[in-house]
């Protein structure tokens, strides 16, 4: 689920292979709006490697549109995956 309050976007639920395609579709309209965007993952529960791909796609979209993006409150399990894949430097975390 995605909740938006201005440039603050809060995600909740699971970010897994079963959910990321829908999350990507839902988020498409959000990224057409002016940034900067603050992505808050404090409500995210279960994750898998698809969540890392989704994060990287959002970073790519922001860069392509010339918008600033900040990621905050990554759950521990997602932080671990980001480190395992060695992409922590690619994510603008707060």
Image: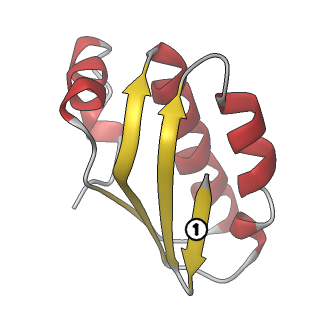
- Residue at image point 77% right, 71% down: 32
Q: Depth check: give the residue in front, 57 or 15.
A: 15
| Badge 1 element | strand
At 72% from the left edge and 42% from the top edge, which residue is drawn?
A: 24
Given residues 70 and 18, the one toward you in this image is: 18
Give the answer, above or below, for where 45 lies relative to 41: above
Q: What is the x, y in percent for residue 35?
A: 57, 80
**Coordinates of residue 4 in the picture (x, y in percent):** 58, 75
Residue labelled with disc 1:
3
**Left or right, 28 with reference to 45:** right
Q: Is residue 25 left or right of residue 34?
A: right
Tell me the quarter of the picture where residue 54 sits: top right
Q: Position of residue 10 (x, y in %)?
A: 47, 63
Give residue 88's quadrant in the image: top left
The residue sitting at 21% across, 62% down in the picture is 94
Q: Is residue 36 above or below residue 48?
A: below
Query: Is residue 36 or residue 7 the one in the foreground?
Result: 7
Which one is nearer the viewer's eye here, 87 or 48? Answer: 48
How packed is label 1: few (under 14 Cα within 10 Å), some, or many (20 or more)?
Answer: few
- Quarter of the rendering containing residue 78: top left
Coloration of the structure image: secondary structure
How many numbered badges does the structure rendering display?
1
Residue placed at 49% from the left, 28% from the top?
Answer: 51
Q: Is residue 94 above or below residue 67?
A: above
* Residue 29 % position (x, y): 80, 65
């Amino acid at each position: 689920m995605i909740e938006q309050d201005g440039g603050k976007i809060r995600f909740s639920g699971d970010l897994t292979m079963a959910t990321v395609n829908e999350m990507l579709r839902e988020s498409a309209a959000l990224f057409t709006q002016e940034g900067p965007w603050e992505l808050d993952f404090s409500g995210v529960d279960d994750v898998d490697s698809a969540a890392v791909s989704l994060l990287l796609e959002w970073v790519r979209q922001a860069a392509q549109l010339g918008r600033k993006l900040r990621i905050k409150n990554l759950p521990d399990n997602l932080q671990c995956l980001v480190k395992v894949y060695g992409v922590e430097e690619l994510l603008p975390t707060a």
